[in-house]
Amino acid sequence: MKEMLGSMQGKVVKVGRGGPESRTGQFLGGGDDYFALLTKEDGVLYVHGQHLKSVTEMTKGGQSFEAAEGFSVLSGTSFRDILTNLELTWVQINRGGPEKIEGVLNRVNEDHISVIVKDEIIRLPIFHIKSISSGAAAQSDAQTEENSSNNNSNSNSNKNSDNSASNDGGDFVARSRNRRR
């Protein structure tokens, strides 16, 4: 993989052909079984080579790529090294769909990792990790998603309490009328 991607250093590339795992960014380099990509959405994204289906070099209009400044790139010879460097940091594993996980990378073992997500500990085989990013971009996405779900649940509980209040009031009025008759 290193040989195939070696000529892409600094170029703007698209990883994947579409879907939630597809990203466009500046190729930063990599190791034996992974590479780093600087993206607008995720900051530095580490892509696991086992799941790489395609890399497209952007030749038209892709050369003017701008992303956040002040990023740092982890180094390591393997994807497992990158995971080890990310221990005890907030991460987003995979980009979307049901396989997306956001939380604190707790521990990296020989063949799996553990991630703390709210009040759960999720164990995930390293083989099934397609990509990982860390830091403020991943954390702000999680906070936005959590705030959205909290607002929805608060809204639903308010509706339920409003409905029960109006039902109680309606029942009270009906009972009062029945007593007068």
Image (cartoon, rainbow, N blue to C red):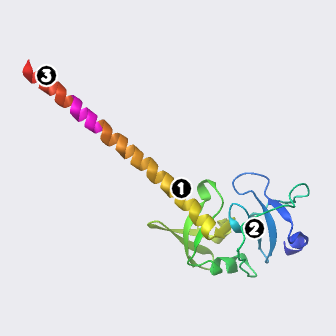
Which residue is located at x 63 percent, y 80 percent? 84
Q: Give 30 or 110, whichever is nearer the viewer.
A: 30
The residue indicated by pointer 2 is: 38
The residue indicated by pointer 1 is: 145
The residue indicated by pointer 3 is: 177
The quadrant holding residue 98 is bottom right
What separation in Å lies between label 2 and label 3 (alpha carbons)? 70 Å
Mark 1: which amino acid? Answer: Glu
Q: Residues within 10 Å of mark 2 (few under 14, many from 20)?
A: many
> Which portion, as a residue range, is magenta?
164-170
Q: Position of residue 119 (x, y in %)?
A: 43, 66
Q: Magenta region's main secondary structure?
A: helix
Q: Give 135 or 105, whichever is nearer the viewer.
A: 135
- Residues marked 3 and 1 touching at CB (< 8 Å): no
Q: Residues within 10 Å of mark 3 (few under 14, many from 20)?
A: few
Mark 3: which amino acid? Answer: Arg
